[in-house]
Image: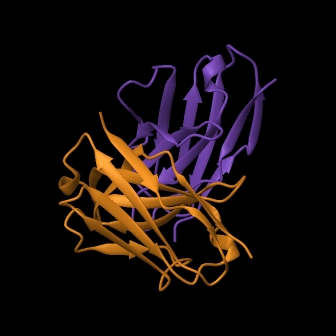
Chain colours: A purple, B orange
């Protein structure tokens, strides 16, 4: 199975900060990567698909980049609603795998 | 509006069985692949199982293979997960998720999950 590794596991930031989360795949997954946001007690919400395509309705401060084995999720100016846990997910094969998550906390 | 509503979770003893359901509405259920994803308390997301739109193709994570069975009833707009021989490590919130086609890979067409239900908690404990 393809392993997904996110860094950092926890990130402390302030409102207005630029935030970057990295996701690495154990083998090339082309651009078959999605990013999700999850808040406590809630279901995950799709943010980005195909590495860099913004899901409809998602604020433009979220962006994704990368291909092959290295990917990033960037929040250009962190807002109070963005404090949450973020997961990457590969969909290159029929065994979907997620990163372990990155919790974005208030500094 | 797309809605996915899971039900059937609860407390079950190790070795027991449980059947989860996911009721879909707001879209043409029979046209979409569906998945189950779980999340153990305080842990990350783990994909559990996939079923094609017709039900003819099914995949499982190794951790549940041989114990869990995914199925669907397109006439009832419903997805199911039959869970047998449950273990303490199966304790989790179980989500159903709609899959949307992402493209064609060397493995065939695969997709990502655009809508998720609110989840149902399964607790395996004596």
Please tell me which residue lies in front, B104 or B82.
Answer: B82
Please tell me which residue lies in front, B13 or B4.
Answer: B13
Farthest residue to the top: give it: A16
Residue A29 position by quadrant: bottom left
> Is B11 placed above or below B67 here?
above
Q: Is residue B74 left or right of residue B110?
A: left
Residue B45 position by quadrant: bottom right
- Look at 27% across and 51% down and name the residue there: B101
- Look at 58% across and 25% down and name the residue there: A75
> Is A78 placed above or below B88 here?
above
The picture places residue A73, in percent across and down from the top left corner, at 55, 35
The picture places residue B39, in percent across and down from the top left corner, at 61, 57
Q: Is residue B45 left or right of residue A30?
A: right
Please tell me which residue lies in front, B48 or A41.
Answer: A41
Whether residue A78 is visible: no
Residue A15 position by quadrant: top right
The C terminus of chain A, quarter of image = top right
The picture places residue B94, in percent across and down from the top left corner, at 53, 58
The picture places residue B53, in percent across and down from the top left corner, at 22, 62
- Look at 53% across and 44% down and name the residue there: A71
Whether residue B125 is visible: yes
> Is B43 placed above or below A78 here?
below
Q: Is residue A51 left or right of residue B92?
A: left
Q: How many marks?
A: 0
- Look at 67% across and 80% down and name the residue there: B14
């Amino acid at each position: 199975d393809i392993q997904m590794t996110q860094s950092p596991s926890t990130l402390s930031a302030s409102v207005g900060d630029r935030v970057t989360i990295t996701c690495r795949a154990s083998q090339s997954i082309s651009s078959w990567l999605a990013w999700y946001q999850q808040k406590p007690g809630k279901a995950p919400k799709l943010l980005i698909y195909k590495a860099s395509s913004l899901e409809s309705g998602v604020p433009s401060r979220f962006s994704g980049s990368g291909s092959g084995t290295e990917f990033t999720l960037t929040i250009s100016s962190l807002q109070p609603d963005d404090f949450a846990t973020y997961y990457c997910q590969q969909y290159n094969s029929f065994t979907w795998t997620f990163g372990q998550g990155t919790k974005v906390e208030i500094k | 509006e797309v809605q996915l509503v899971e039900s059937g979770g609860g407390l079950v003893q190790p070795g027991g069985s449980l059947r989860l359901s996911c009721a879909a509405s707001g879209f043409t259920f029979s046209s979409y692949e569906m998945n189950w994803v779980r999340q153990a308390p305080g842990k990350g997301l783990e994909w559990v199982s996939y079923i094609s739109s017709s039900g003819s193709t099914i995949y499982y994570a190794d951790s549940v293979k041989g114990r869990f069975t995914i199925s669907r009833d397109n006439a009832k707009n419903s997805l199911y997960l039959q869970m047998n021989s449950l273990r303490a490590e199966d304790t989790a919130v179980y989500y159903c998720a709609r899959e949307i086609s992402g493209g064609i890979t060397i493995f065939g067409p695969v997709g990502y999950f655009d809508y998720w239900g609110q989840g149902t908690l399964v607790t395996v404990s004596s």
